[in-house]
Amino acid sequence: MKQIVFTTIFMATTLSAYAETRDTLPEKPEVTVVSHALAMHDVPKYDADFQHFAYVNPDAPKGGTLRLSAIGTYDNFNRYASRGLAAERSGELYDTLYTSSDDELGVYYPLIATQAEYSESWNWVAVDLNPNARFHDGEPITAEDFAFSFQKFLDEGVPQFRRYYADVSVYVEHPHRLIITIAQPDKEKLFSILALPVLPEHFWQDKDFSEPLSVPPVGSSAYYISDYKTGQQITYSLKEDYWGADIPVNKGRYNFEKIIYDYYRDSNVSLEAFKAGEYDLRSESSAKNWATLYTGPAFDNNQIIKDVIPHSIPRPMNALVFNTARPLFSDARVREALAYAFDFEWMNKALFYNAYSRTRSYFQSSPYEATDLPSEEELHYLTPLKAQLPARVFTESYQPPVSEGDGLIRRNLLVAKNLLADAGWIVRNQKLVNAETGEAFTFELMIYTPDQERTALPFQANLKRLGIDMNIRMVDTSQFTNRMRNQDYDMIDRGFNSNQYPSGGLKITWHSEFMDSSYNAASANEPAIDTLTELIAQSQGDGEALAALGPALDRVLQWHFYVIPKWHLSAYWVAYWDKFAKPETRPDYSLGLDTWWSTDAEKR
């Protein structure tokens, strides 16, 4: 028996050295559960005998090519390297023990695994592996490969998450069975471990996992890298003898023979290439582009289809993010003041054709969004923290500043001016300066696309009226990534991923313990937020507690003004050449592109 102690959250893992003992394997409790699927909160939709997901066509034909675009460049094939830019889709080369369905939230079904046995208290889980699972070179996928993957993530992966999983141990019982234990029961931690990529030990054992990889790795998923031009193009081909082609979670998926990504300098060049037929499908995020640029003969004769596809996916907090570790933005009054210079209503009307809704929550479009005043259940967690929290957490429901949409925001700028004065900033010679030091209020907004610049310019002009100089710095994606990793910025246009439910991973995004992590983009460092994220991590699997803790954390984050919220759209804007078919049933929480298929191979 090999014991492994580790720390991980999908892309980063901590493991100790192997210990050659069987004595430390804990005794199993009397009450255990054996299940084909694992669910965070709800009962799995699909039973143990399900043949395929409801949103696929199990008889979809295989063949054809799907051509897509990417922006910028790439220089390696290691999605988990600590530097460099990995190729599109390179994070999907490896299968995992379990995979999620796209019509449920927080439910996982076997991929490499076949079933799981676990305790009712969720302090351990044993996983059986499919003996037919194979890497692309034909080598079997074993529990030893899973253990090796943990060790690689520990020694050479991203370091920030090690502390988070320090109380977890893994035991390799035999080549097709492993056992995971945790000192403090935590359902979500166990689930996140089961979603870790399983690396082939025979390929990675003599390579540094933290470094870029110049050759395609040996994978295990439906596609492998069959051709590439570094920085320009990459081709993925369907593995003819893919081991998992007919297991239930894959049936009806991965129908294209090839998927090709062409790289373009920027989004505008990419759009023109799409309209010229250089690639097949484009997901649009710019309202102006969608309203004005998706025109021409190919649209008129229905060669290109414009499709608005509603969805139920919780929306991310896209925003301008303050680095609160910068002294300039350490005062919440300053951060709140700058939000009054951001005129969403005017931009939505003048630039976006009124297509967007304003984002206000870190759980936008989910049941955990904070609305109205705190509920009695929320107050159970918030009241003990009252001395550490802004008073408005208890007395007001947060809303971003609103304007009339006519471009005249004098009233909002007056509020901003008063907030800045309270924080010690005054106007001298039309410049905002610190009343004590005379330091001018100047900062840099780091962006990486022309679309971001287009929306930053009106904000810059409004700040100028307050005497503030905001320099807009556009960098390439490589420099943006490197500076973000080093937290070398005043403000960035980035935001935070959507939260389907309050997860333990919120600690990495908001807990002070992870201030040096690029995930904690705002450099949050507040005891009350630490407490709430810790309580959320401890309450995984307790739906009643999370129903209160989610909105409680949401409103605390809102009233700390870590970001200036931007906007969201609860639909996909997708344009594609008329070469595809898709299932009648669409998944609720995904575009479902991996379920589409080619209808005209001759055009390809």
Image (cartoon, rainbow, N blue to C red):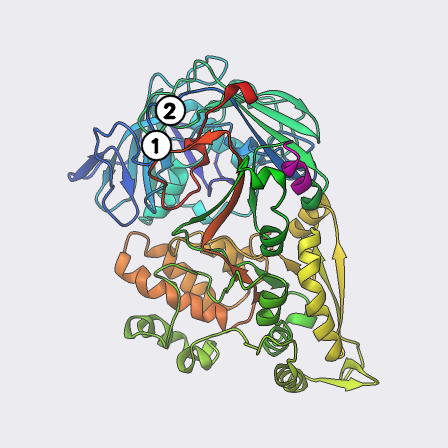
- Disc number at residue 312? none
Q: Which residue is mark 1?
A: 56
Residue type at mark 2 is Ala
Query: Which residue reaches farthest left?
Result: 30
Q: Position of residue 450 (x, y in %)?
A: 71, 53
Asked if 207 appears above or below 407 in the picture, the reply is: above
Residue type at mark 1 is Val
Question: Which quarter of the figure has residue 461?
Answer: bottom right
Q: Nearer the viewer, residue 246 or 186?
A: 246
Q: Nearer the viewer, residue 553 or 209?
A: 553
Instruction: Give SS at disc 2.
Output: loop
Q: Position of residue 510 (x, y in %)?
A: 51, 60
Q: Which residue is mark 2?
A: 60
Query: Which residue reaches farthest right?
Result: 429
Q: Please rate how many residues cluster around mark 1, counting C-alpha atoms within 10 Å: few if below 14, some from 14 to 19, many from 20.
A: many
Provide the residue span drawn in magenta. 270-277
Can the viewer see residue 542?
A: yes
Tell me, yes or no, whether the two marked residues, 1 and 2, touch with CB atoms within 8 Å.
yes
